[in-house]
Image: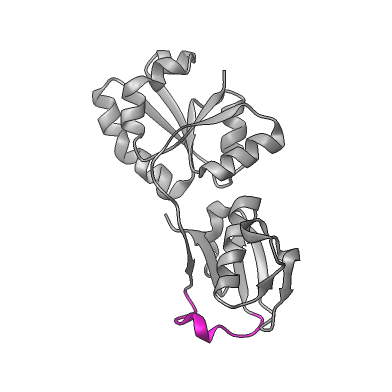
Amino acid sequence: MKRRSIISLCICAIAAGGLLTGCGEEDTQSGILKVGASPVPHADILKAAQPVLAKEGVKLEIIEFTDYVQPNMALADKELDANFFQHKPYLDNFAKERKLQLESLVAVHIEPMGVYSKKVKDIKSVADAAKVAIPNDPTNGGRALKILADAGFFTLKDGVGVNGTPADIINNPKQIQIVEMEAAVLPRALDDVDFAVINSN
């Protein structure tokens, strides 16, 4: 049976509507639902769901992760009943690369990306050799590079689309420095870089 990854704002309805009996785990059968999540916003969303689930007799246990690898590994190892932190392209790529039986239970919200900074007020005023943080996973990193390319910072090799890597940058007149980081820690890195491309949760 495939393990299930929640990519939804509707965990309350999911849990009440069948996830608890569908997982087949001892914890869920006893009324405990263990869900892994990135701290912001997913863990915060789950915390809001805790009292709602408690009224249904479900104890929601939230396990926070600061990277995008361990929540899926913990799910595959049956240490979690579900997780809540990723979009479907990332999940599909992760499962394929590691040959894991993971699947999305439901997808509801879209996680767009945006450019954030504590130092730069106008994207047109970015200094030469600026440090830009992007996610270090293939699906989000490629999306971030395309955003930067579309904004005119550099050019990517023809045809790479959202699958580009820093090695695909072929014209970088401002000598923008790409810093790859775990997606979950990008908001905390804003003090250390000029700006960052972050899933806009």
- Asked if residue 171 shows in the view, the reply is yes
Residue drawn at the location 70% of the way across and 60% of the way down? 165
Residue 31 location, quadrant:
top left
- Would you say 39 lies left or right of 54 here? right
Q: Nearer the viewer, residue 160 or 176?
A: 160
Quadrant that contains the C terminus: bottom left
Q: Is residue 14 above or below residue 145?
A: above
> How many numbered marks, from 0 up?
0
Nearer to us in this view, 33 or 108: 108
Residue 24 versus residue 165 in the image, above or below: above
Q: Is residue 132 above or below residue 161?
A: below
User: Dividing the picture into quarters, in which one does residue 194 lie?
Assistant: bottom right
Return the x and y of residue 167 as percentages of the image width and height: 76, 64
Any part of residue 192 in sight: no
Furthest residue to the left? 55
| Residue 19 falls left or right of residue 102 | left
Residue 105: x, y in percent?
A: 46, 30
> What residue range appears in magenta?
118-129
Q: Is residue 125 magenta?
A: yes
Say if the magenta span includes residue 121. yes
Extreme residue toward the front, this view: 159
- Residue at image location 70% in from the left, 38% down from the top: 97
- Residue, x 46% and y 82% (percent of image)? 122
**Quadrant that contains the N terminus:** top right
Q: Position of residue 48 (x, y in %)?
A: 30, 40
